[in-house]
Image: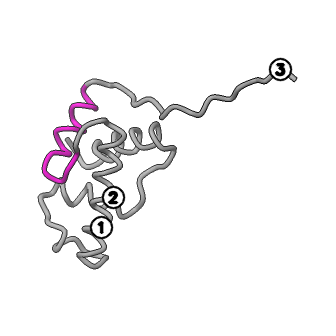
Amino acid sequence: MTPEEAIQVADEVLLAYAGNALTDIQRMILRESLAGKGYESMAGYTSQHIKNEGKKLWDLLSDALGEKVSKKNFKGTLEKRLNSGAMVPKPPKPLKYDVGY
């Protein structure tokens, strides 16, 4: 899986689930994580900020995909999604009741 494929799949999943695309830092975390880099060696932000944003990213992907996603397993999880071609349904919207007045 290339970094571009990982970003595309994650973008599609998050757009379908929450209506939001990946942020720049989330894209960087995916790209650098695929390259095998640790948070401490990712440039541009403090390592603590990258760790915090990474946790948010893995939690968002976990919620969207319905399975635990982490820095260690995200590649396989996104590859599975890429190969299946499945889209993630949007979360259910509250029902609007017509009271008929």
Q: Which mark is residue 43?
A: none
Instruction: Mark 3 and mark 1 in contact? Answer it, CB < 8 Å.
Output: no
Residue drawn at point x = 76 percent, y = 23 percent: 98
Residue drawn at point x = 79 percent, y = 24 percent: 99
Cα distance in 3D space between marks 1 and 2: 6 Å
Give the secondary structure at mark 2. helix
- Can you identify the residue that label 2 sits on? 56
Looking at the rendered image, the quarter that the C terminus falls into is: top right
Q: Is residue 20 above or below residue 33?
A: above
Question: In the image, is 26 to the left or to the right of 42?
Answer: right
Please tell me which residue lies in front, 86 or 52.
Answer: 52
What percent of the width, then of the height, locates residue 49? 30, 73
Mark 3 or mark 1, which has the lower sequence index?
A: 1
In the rendered image, residue 81 lying in the magenta stretch gets the answer yes
For the residue marked with disc 2, what is the amino acid?
Answer: Lys
Q: Which mark is residue 100?
A: 3
Instruction: Mark 1 and mark 2 in contact? Answer it, CB < 8 Å.
Output: yes
Tell me the magenta residue range: 69-83
Residue drawn at point x = 27 percent, y = 79 percent: 46
Q: Is residue 42 above or below residue 36?
A: below
